Amino acid sequence: MRRREFLSLLGGTAVAWPSVAHAQKPGMPLIGYISGATSDFMREYVNAFHQGLGSAGYIADINVLVEYRWAEGRNDRLADLIADLVQRRVDVIAVGGSTPGALAAKAATQNIPVVFLVGTDPVEVGLVTSLAKPGGNLTGITILNVELLAKCLELMQDLMPPATRTAVLLNPANTLQIKFERQTLQRAERTLAVRPMTFNASNPPEIDAAFAAIAEAGVQALVISGEYFFLTQRDLLVALAARYRIPTIYAYAEFTETGGLMSYGTNNFDAHRRVGVNTGRVLRGELPGNLPVEQITKVEMEINLKTASSLGIKFPLAMLGRADKIVE
C-alpha cells in the first residue's frame, strides 16, 4: 500500500484519503473512519488499517471509499463527528483506538456496523454482550492496556532498588478506562505490596504540571497509562521524563523508539491492521454480532540502553534477556 497524502477539510475535522476527495461511486462501499487523535498522528496507523483492508480484498479508491473524521484530542467532538458519518450513510464505521469513540458510535446507530479498537474490556464498558458473540452491530479488537498496568509496576520493581517511590500517570478524561485502571492499581497494591502515587493529566499543560508535581514529590520511577491520549503526546512525555530524570515505563514501543526508557505492551500497528481486516469482513457480508471480538494478547518488551545510560541505570541481565528489542 503506497503512502498517500491527507487532505484536511473544514478546519481539520474531515480528512479524505487519498489526496483528492471523490463522490461516492454507485455500488462502491463507503467506510467512515473516526479517531480521537489528529490526522498527522494517525498517519502510520491508518496505513496499517489500509494494509488490513487490502488483505481482505479492499483497496481505497479502487473498490472502497473512506471518509475520515478526527476529534483532534477532544472527546466532546466525537458524537457530532459520528453523527455526520451516520448522516452520510456509510456502510461501516471503523473506530481507531478510542473507547469514548466506540461508545459514541454505539449510541449513534443500531443499524450501521461498527468495528472498534479499544484498550478496555468491551464487555465491562458496555460495548458488547460477550467477546465470543458480541451481538448487535459492533465487533472489534481489544488490547491489554488496563491489565498491563500492574505488570508495568512489577517491571519497575524489578528494575529499581527496594523502597523506590513510584507513581502512575492517568487520564481522568477517559472516565471508564480510569475506573478500571484504579481497580487494577488496587489489586496491584495487594499482590505487589506497592502503593504508587497517582497523578492526572488530560492535556499538554496538565502533563507539564503533573511532571513538575511528580518531581517535587520525589518520585523515582513512573508508569504511564496506556490510555490513547498519552500515545499522542509521546514526544512531550519522553522529553519531560528526560528533563526531570525520572525512569519511566510506557505501554507502547513507539515511546522507547523515540527515547523512552522502557515499554511493555501490545503491538499497536498490528491492532490497527486487524481493524482493517475485520472491516473488510463486514463489507463482505459477515454480521458484526457474529464476529468474535479479538483480544491481542501478545506483549512485547523494549529497552532503550542509551536512555538507561543517561539515567545511570543498569538493567539486570535477566530483564535484558526477556526483552524483545533493545535500542542501543
Image (tube, helix red, strand yellow):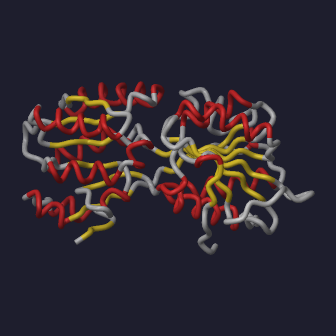
Apparent side of residue 89 relative to residue 168 in the rendered image (left or right): right
Residue at the front extreme? Answer: 11
Front-most of 257 and 204?
Answer: 204
Percent x, y of residue 228: 44, 43
The number of callouts visible is: 0
Residue at the right extreme? Answer: 26
* Quadrant in the picture for the N terminus: bottom right
Front-most of 64 and 205?
Answer: 205
Apparent side of residue 160 relative to residue 133 in the rendered image (left or right): left
Residue sitting at 7 percent across and 58 percent down?
312
Percent x, y of residue 304: 23, 63
Residue 21 vertical position relative to residue 126 in the rendered view, above or below: below
Percent x, y of residue 114: 70, 41
Residue sitting at 80 percent across and 42 percent down?
88
* Quadrant in the picture for the C terminus: bottom left
Front-most of 23 and 58?
Answer: 23
Residue 126 vertical position relative to residue 82 in the rendered view, above or below: above
Residue sitting at 30 percent across and 34 percent down?
206
Front-most of 231 and 176?
Answer: 231
Apparent side of residue 301 relative to residue 278 in the rendered image (left or right): left
Percent x, y of residue 51: 63, 66
